Image: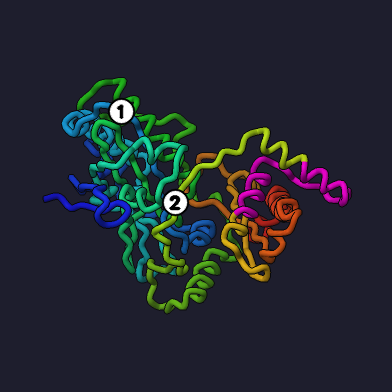
Amino acid sequence: MAPERDIGGVNNNRLVKIHEACKVPPFSDDSTAAAVAATTLPLTYFDTYCFNLSPVDNLLFYEIKDLTWDSFNSEILPKLKHSLSITLLHYLPVAGHLMWPPDAEKPAVCYFKDDGVSVTVAESNADLRLLSSNNGTRRAVEFHPLAPRLSISDDKAEVTAIQITLFPNQGFSICISVHHTVIDGKSAVLFIKSWAYLCKKLQQQNVVVPVPSLLPESLTPCFDRSLIKDPRGIDMVYVKQLMAFTGSDPNTRSLKVTIPVTKVDSNLVRKTFTLTREDLNKLKHNLLVNKDQHPSKQLHLSTFVLTCAHVFVCLVKARGEDTNTTVTFWVPADCRSRLDPPLPGNYFGSCILAEFAVAKAGDFMREDGIAFVAEKLSDSVKGLKKGDAIIVHRG
C-alpha cells in the first residue's frame, strides 16, 4: 500500500496518498554531455545572510475537471517530468545540493552527474477549489501535506524538492520547495516561469521525447558570482554570527543551523482579505490628514507601505500583546537593482537584505497606530532606495 499523509488531523477522512518518489535529473544525451558536467557554485554574502531561513514553498493549483489518474499519469505527468528535466539543463544548481566541504570556510552549491530534483507524485481527496480559492476559511494544516520536505542533514541539503498532487476530477497542484540560502523569491519565480515556458513549448511541439531547447534571454539564469564584490569578507561574518547566535559548535559545519521557531498552532486558519483601491485611498487620506500635523515629514506612502502598516497593526491587536512588548518588523528588498553596478534582473541566487524597525506594541494599538507604523516603514523604504542598507554590506 502506498504511504499516506493525514490532512488536518486524525479521523477527518482527508488523506494524501503517495504514488511515486523519484529523482528527475537534468536532460542529458550526446549533445548535452558537456553541459551537465559537475559544477560548484560559491555562496555570496547575500546567500549566507539567508543561511538560517526556513525553506520556502511555492504552491500552484491547476483546475481541470474530469481529470482521472489514468489521464493524469499518461499525459500530464510525463510532460511535467520531461519539461522539468530540460529546465534543469539550464539550472544545474537547482538539481544539486548545498554542501560544506571539509577544507572550505563556508558551504557551496555542488552539482554532480547523478544529481537530480526529488519529485513526489501524490493524490489527494481534498477540495481543490476551496484550497485555491480566495473565499472561505481554510485550516493551515490542510496545505502542509501538499508540500515536499527538503532533505537536510549535517553535511548535505537539497536545493529543491517538488511535489505534484492529483485531485481526481478537480485538477492538480505543484509545490516547489526551495532552500532560501540558494534561491530567493525572484529566482524561484524565474525557475517556475522557465519550467512553464518549456512545458508549453513541449506541448506545442507534441513530441514524446524532449529535446534540448533554448530559453529566451529574460528567462536564462545568470550564475556569475564575480558580479558581487565582498572585499570585507561579510559572507563569513554572517556565517560566524549565525553559528554564535544559535549556539552551534563552529567546528561541526552543520547545515542544520536554523533559528528556533515557535511550534505552529494546529488550529491556525488561512483567509484572504482584499484591500480595494478605495480602501487604500481611504488609508492614505487618513495618513495625509495626520501628516498635516508634521508638515516637515515626507512619507513614502506606496501601496506596499499602506498595506503592511494596516496588516501589522491588525496583527498586533489580534494577538493581544502587552503594550510594553517589543515588536520587531522588517522590510525585505530585492537588491539586484540597488547594487552599484546593478546586477542583471535574471541573476539567480539569493539577493535580498532587510531594513529592521523596533517599537512597542502600545505604539501599534494607539489611535494613530497605522500612521506610526507607516512612518517607520516609510523611513525603511526610503533608506533602501538611497542604498543605505547596501553600502554597509558592499564594502
The colour scheme of the drawn protein is: rainbow
Q: Residue furthest front?
A: 11
Circle 1 — which element?
A: loop
Up-down relation of residue 24 to residue 392 (above or below): above
- Horizontally, residue 113 falls left or right of residue 61, namely left
For the residue carrying disc 2, how many other residues have a C-alpha within 10 Å: few (<14), some (14-19), or many (20+)?
few
Q: In this rendered view, identify the residue nearer to me: 123 or 108.
A: 123
Q: Residue furthest left?
A: 1
Q: Image quarter for residue 369?
A: bottom right
Task: Assess whether residue 104 is covered by the magenta stretch.
Answer: no
- Write down the residue under mark 1: 64
Q: Amino acid at mark 1?
A: Ile
Q: Amino acid at mark 2?
A: Val
Q: CA distance from mark 2 to mark 1?
A: 26 Å
Magenta residues, dominant SS class: helix
> Residue 228 location in percent, x, y?
56, 53
Residue occupying image coordinates x 26% and y 44% = 25
Q: In this rendered view, identify the residue nearer to me: 74 or 187.
A: 74
- Horizontally, residue 299 falls left or right of residue 135, namely right
Identify the image quadrant of the C terminus.
bottom right
- Horizontally, residue 285 falls left or right of residue 12, namely right
> Residue 103 location in percent, x, y?
38, 70
Residue occupying image coordinates x 19% and y 28% = 71
Q: Earlier in the sequence, mark 2 or mark 1?
A: 1
Up-down relation of residue 153 to residue 95 (above or below): below
- Write down the residue under mark 2: 269
Q: Which residues are magenta?
A: 286-314
